[in-house]
Image (tube, rainbow, N blue to C red):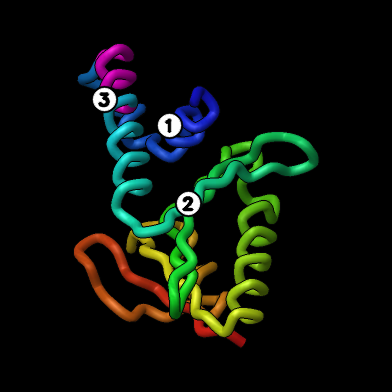
């Protein structure tokens, strides 16, 4: 679980940078959020799959997804900082696209509007199909 927690924390710099919180307060908050998120992902979907992303034998991130009747829902994808901007996520997404194309299913994902990867999703063929508060539900059609 330490790896999963470290991956989670690597995506929460905003919390790590709260100056009024002690390191212990940050750690306790992050632990509770990590558990809540994992439980929500695993309990909030019918058939969620959870995978560790590995690159050349090294742990590089995590992926939660669910293959449904009409789409492959990416529940969450997170890559450790040392593997970001090196094609790790793009390579993984190409594998998901290949699966989606072969099964004639779309790929969907909720993306935070302020996520720096939003441009990547758009360039990769995703379109916004729903506006949900701070997220956009994005979809890429097969083929």
Q: Height in image: 108 above or below 76? A: below
Q: Position of residue 92 (x, y in %)?
A: 65, 58
Q: In the current view of this chain or complex, which residue is farthest to the bottom?
A: 143
**Left or right side of 65 for 132:** left
The residue pinned by badge 2 equals 64
Q: Position of residue 54 (x, y in %)?
A: 69, 42
SS at mark 2 in the image? strand
* Left/right of residue 129 with respect to residue 52 in the rendered view: left
Q: Is residue 133 left or right of residue 140?
A: left
Magenta span includes 77 = no
Dot 3 alpha-carbon crowd within 10 angstroms: few under 14, some 14 to 19, many 20 or more: few
Look at the picture and state if 25 lies above or below 96.
above
Q: How far is disc 2 from disc 1 in space, using C-alphas? A: 16 Å
Image quadrant containing the C terminus:
bottom right
Q: Which residues are magenta?
A: 22-30
Query: What is the x, y in percent for residue 2?
Result: 51, 23
Estimate the x, y position of residue 60 in percent, counting from the top left.
Answer: 64, 40
């Amino acid at each position: 679980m330490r790896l999963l927690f470290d991956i989670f924390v690597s995506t929460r710099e905003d919390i790590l940078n709260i100056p009024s919180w002690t390191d212990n307060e940050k750690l306790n908050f992050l632990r509770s959020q990590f558990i809540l998120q994992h439980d929500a992902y695993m309990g909030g979907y019918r058939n969620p799959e959870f995978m560790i992303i590995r690159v050349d034998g090294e742990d590089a991130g995590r992926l939660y997804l669910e293959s449904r009747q009409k789409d492959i829902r990416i529940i969450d994808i997170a890559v450790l900082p040392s593997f970001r901007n090196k094609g790790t996520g793009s390579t993984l997404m190409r594998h998901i696209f290949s699966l989606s194309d072969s099964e004639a299913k779309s790929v969907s994902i909720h993306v935070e509007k302020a996520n720096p990867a939003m441009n990547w999703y758009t360039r990769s063929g995703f379109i916004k199909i729903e506006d949900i508060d701070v997220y956009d539900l994005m979809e890429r059609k097969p083929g």
